[in-house]
């Protein structure tokens, strides 16, 4: 599930934390909330495409869904 689908399922304070701490290691409770909402967490970090999406959102842009690499 892409970030555009699970982002609205997060609590507002979690969204604010992700914007303020974009790219940083996730707090355990934030990581759990993301995974429960259907998001992906790699170790304690969001995938790079999701970090870029949050950055665009924080800059007031309407981000496109992140492009996920395909596996062959």
Image (cartoon, rainbow, N blue to C red):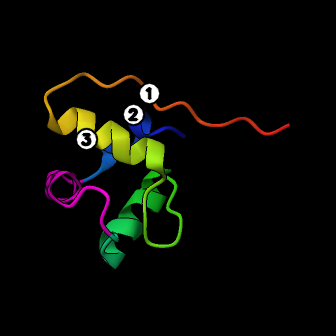
- Tell me which numbered mark, 3 or 2, is placed earlier along the sequence: 2
Element under disc 3: helix
In contact (CB < 8 Å): disc 1 and disc 2: yes
Which residue lies under the disc numbered 2? 4
Element under disc 1: loop
Q: Nearer the viewer, residue 31 or 37?
A: 31
First to last magenta residue range? 11-24
Label 2 CA crowd tier, 10 Å (few <14, some 14–19, many 20+): some
Give the percent coordinates (x, y) of residue 27: 30, 75
Q: CA distance from mark 1 to mark 3?
A: 13 Å
- Tell me which numbered mark, 1 or 3, is placed earlier along the sequence: 3
Furthest residue in direction right, as rendered: 72
Q: Quadrant of the C terminus?
A: top right
Residue at the spot x=35%, y=40% of the render? 52
In contact (CB < 8 Å): disc 3 and disc 2: no
Residue at the spot x=32%, y=58% of the render? 23
Which residue lies under the disc numbered 1? 65
Which residue lies under the disc numbered 3? 55
Q: Nearer the viewer, residue 46 or 6?
A: 46
| Front position among marks 1 and 3 | 3
Q: Is residue 16 magenta?
A: yes
């Amino acid at each position: 599930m892409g970030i555009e689908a699970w982002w609205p399922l997060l609590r507002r304070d979690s969204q604010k934390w992700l914007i303020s701490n974009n790219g940083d290691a996730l707090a355990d409770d934030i990581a759990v909330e993301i995974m429960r909402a259907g998001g992906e967490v790699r170790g304690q970090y969001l995938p790079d495409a999701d970090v870029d999406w949050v950055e665009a959102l924080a800059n007031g842009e309407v981000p496109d869904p992140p492009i996920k690499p395909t596996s062959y």
